[in-house]
Image: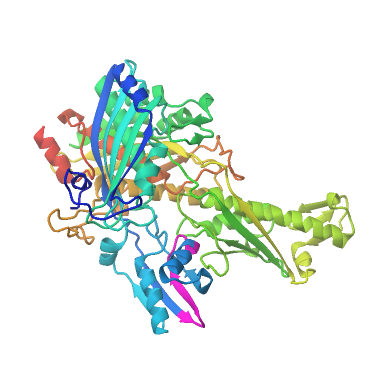
Amino acid sequence: MVEAAEAVQPGERPLGAVAGGSDRRVSPLGIAEEAKAAFARAAHVTEIELHNQRVIAMAMEPRCAIGVHEKGRTTIYTQAQQPTGARDALAAALGANPADLRVVNGDIGGGFGMKTGATPEEALVAYAARKLGRPVRWRGDQSEEFLAAHMGRDMHFKAALALDKDGRILALKLHMLGNMGAVPVGSSAMVPLFMVAKVAASVYRVPAVDYHFQAVLTNTMATGAYRGAGRPEGNFLIERLVEKAGREMGIDPVEIRKRNLLQPGEFPHATHAGEIYDVGDFPRMLDGLLKAADWNGYATRAAQSKARGKLRGRGLAAYLEWTGALPTETVDVEVDAQGHVTVFSGTQAMGQGLETTYVQLVTEVLQIPAASVTLVQGDTDRANGVGSVGSRSAFVGGSAVVAAGRTLIVRGRELAAEKLEAAVADIEFRDGRFFIAGTDRALGLAELAAAQPERRMRVSATQTPPTPSWPNGAQACEVEIDPETGEVSVARLSSMDDIGRIINHAIVEGQIQGGMAQGVGQALYEQAVYDRESGQLLTGSLMDYCVPRADQFPPLAAGFDESVPCTTNLLGVKGCGEIGTIGAVPAVVHAVLDALAGFGVTHLEMPLTPEKVWRAMRRR
């Protein structure tokens, strides 16, 4: 039994139990009576069934671990997005005290959610090292990663959208069936049962909802957090419904979105999932995208494609992200007698540039050279915290870095006032030094640290933003299709995103572009497939599982609008690590369907492979 639909058939034997004593969990949300009444008075109802297919995380760097047991303590050198969480989980698995374990990361490579928590292999390595009293090493090869690392997505949706005669949304009704695999990981149930609902209505005004989320066990590898973790799935569904409704009602895809976007005056906005959107200007993002993507110049490009014997289509997607999972982080900042500043953080870099971003924040607050700052992370003997998941690092961790820097200044003013024999109110801080106002008498950070009994100053700060942040934006895609082979080529892909304040533009642009590439991968190429009779994974290597290459992409145009900063954290940031993936999937799918509209094609299941596209054209 590898398909979720099989697991809910009457009389099907349960595989086992999850929380609550059942292998099936259901989470309803909304007021069914309100939604039913809205559908009864609707002028138009759009329905859709779709599968957000199972995909493999595909980090280039496979998981690995080394266990060393010495003097009663076990050290695990590994690749954990959440080092502290991994340490605590391993301690629980081994029946040990967390203080007797240490987790140390090097460069972990790609994570994408797949390297969260602790893995069974890490537990085995730790156990063997403790049992043998010798170092033990394990490194998964790529085939093991395909088979034994948790996967993403695999959700089936059946949904309907009720609209009035002008194409304005009245209600959304959906049923989601998620496949958690046979042995769930920590995020397996959370993603389908809770995360999808947070963004199911996305950037649109949806007066009534009736949601039913169900998750089941099957004879497959577990699914769990994978770049976006429920938000890509929820956004894809509402975008497919809005796009399909517009085509059925004869309303332009831009116009139907504009009629339903929440307006700036409607914030803060309470959702049916109990969340609060603090700020946003969704129409501004859409208008900015249309300009950046040269939406009105499409006809010329379509004519050029036709002259080359190609079909051309364009697609649009608006979207909403939720970031700030587990919204508490503590950061320590220490200054030594040489004036070197060390930042200790429990978040974890994995290619998103935290080493650069955090150092940049510290240099801004303390007004010191970047060469004077070092970041310590990925070592539970030195720094602890929640880790890096859900695009939370800058939103929560970065805020804690700034708070710690400010706390250091407050403490420094007190110490400087004592040393300089002045009132604290008369001490000013600039360029890394504490001055008596109106004089040139000053002490630097190094001098103050050297004057302390331990020849250092160390402070700690904790930040807990009251609500998540809500990055949002829009993407436009143009594709060309070879009518002879069905091959789809992405010709243009543009985004316009509101991620609040941007700390480092180059890093943010890279994050968005990387997310867009993974979204294109799901839309066109990727799908993990199991044999329905044997349960054998059929896509067990890159010979069978297709991922996009760099030469298959045009230049990716990532645009930003910083006019609406987040109001719930010190930095005004909103998170950017996953939003590119969220928008690219529906934008690409809509572009392909637009190119195939002349063949009467209104829906295709992802991935939109050449064979699938070719057969769709031939069938029509």
Q: Is 73 inside the magenta-drawn segment?
A: yes
Query: Does residue 435 appear left or right of residue 615 in this picture?
Result: right
Say which of 193 and 159 sits in front: 193
Residue 104 vs 12, above or below: the answer is: below
Q: In the rendered view, would you say 424 is above or below 447?
A: above
Q: In this view, does 475 lie to the left or right of 72?
A: left
- Colouring mode (rainbow / by chain / secondary structure / one colour): rainbow
In the rendered image, is residue 556 in sight? no
Instruction: Name the spot of residue 391 as percent of width and height, x first.
Output: 47, 49
- In the rendered image, residue 327, in percent from the top left (x then y), is placed at 53, 49
Q: What stretch is highlighted in magenta?
A: 69-84
Q: Measured from the top left, where is residue 481 in percent x and y?
A: 21, 39
| Residue at screen point 82% across, 59% down | 416
Q: Is residue 369 visible?
A: yes
Q: Is residue 341 left or right of residue 131?
A: right
Location of the C terminus by quadrant is top left
